[in-house]
Image: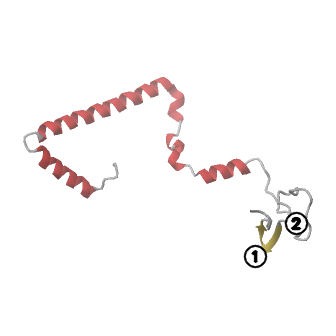
């Protein structure tokens, strides 16, 4: 709740009781209780109106699954990119051959090499010694 733990809440309540004083404390506590009741009633009324407006279709929706805190952007991008494509095979281009076009059909840059280390392909980007 607002990043306040139990100990800090107790300290704040004690400080508020000392600052407000014993004369005005019951009036403020009653006012706080009234605000909390109004907020609860407002939330219940809003929920009832939403349920009434959306009808039966909204009752079957799993709202917890739509919580944005449950989404992992990396997983979403990965699923979107790999959804329609078949798994790609690595393309091996020998380091001695340099295609004249900028890229080769497999998606490797010109001069890129593939070396298998432990069974996994390892891609090395081309090095341009004249680049700034």
According to the image, label 2 marks what residue?
A: 93
Residue 108, placed above or below residue 27 = below
Residue 90 in the image: state x and y as whole percent.
82, 63
According to the image, label 1 marks what residue?
A: 118
Left or right: 101 as drawn, with respect to 78 = right
Point out the residue furthest to the top here.
53
Q: Earlier in the sequence, mark 1 or mark 2?
A: 2
Left or right: 108 as drawn, with respect to 36 = right
Point out the residue furthest to the bottom here.
118
Residue 94 in the image: state x and y as whole percent.
89, 69
Q: Residues within 10 Å of mark 1 (few under 14, many from 20)?
A: few
**Residue situated in front as seen by the camera: 120 or 92:** 92
Which residue is found at the position 40% from the left and 27% from the top?
48
Looking at the rendered structure, the secondary structure element under dot 1 is loop
> In which quadrant will I find the C terminus?
bottom right
Residue 99 in the image: state x and y as whole percent.
91, 61
Left or right: 82 as drawn, with respect to 24 = right
Which residue is found at the position 53% from the left and 35% from the top?
60
């Amino acid at each position: 709740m607002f990043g306040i733990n139990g100990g800090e809440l107790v300290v704040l309540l004690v400080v508020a009781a000392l600052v407000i004083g014993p004369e005005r404390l019951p009036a403020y506590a009653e006012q706080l209780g009234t605000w909390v009741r109004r907020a609860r009633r407002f939330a219940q009324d809003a929920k009832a109106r939403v349920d009434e407006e959306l009808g039966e279709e909204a009752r079957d929706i799993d709202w917890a699954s739509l919580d944005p805190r449950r989404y992992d952007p990396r997983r979403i991008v990965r699923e979107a990119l790999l959804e329609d494509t078949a798994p790609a095979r690595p393309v091996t281009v020998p380091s001695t051959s340099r295609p004249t076009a900028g890229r080769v059909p497999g998606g490797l840059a010109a001069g890129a090499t593939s070396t298998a280390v432990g069974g996994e392909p390892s891609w090395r980007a081309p090095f341009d010694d004249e680049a700034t």
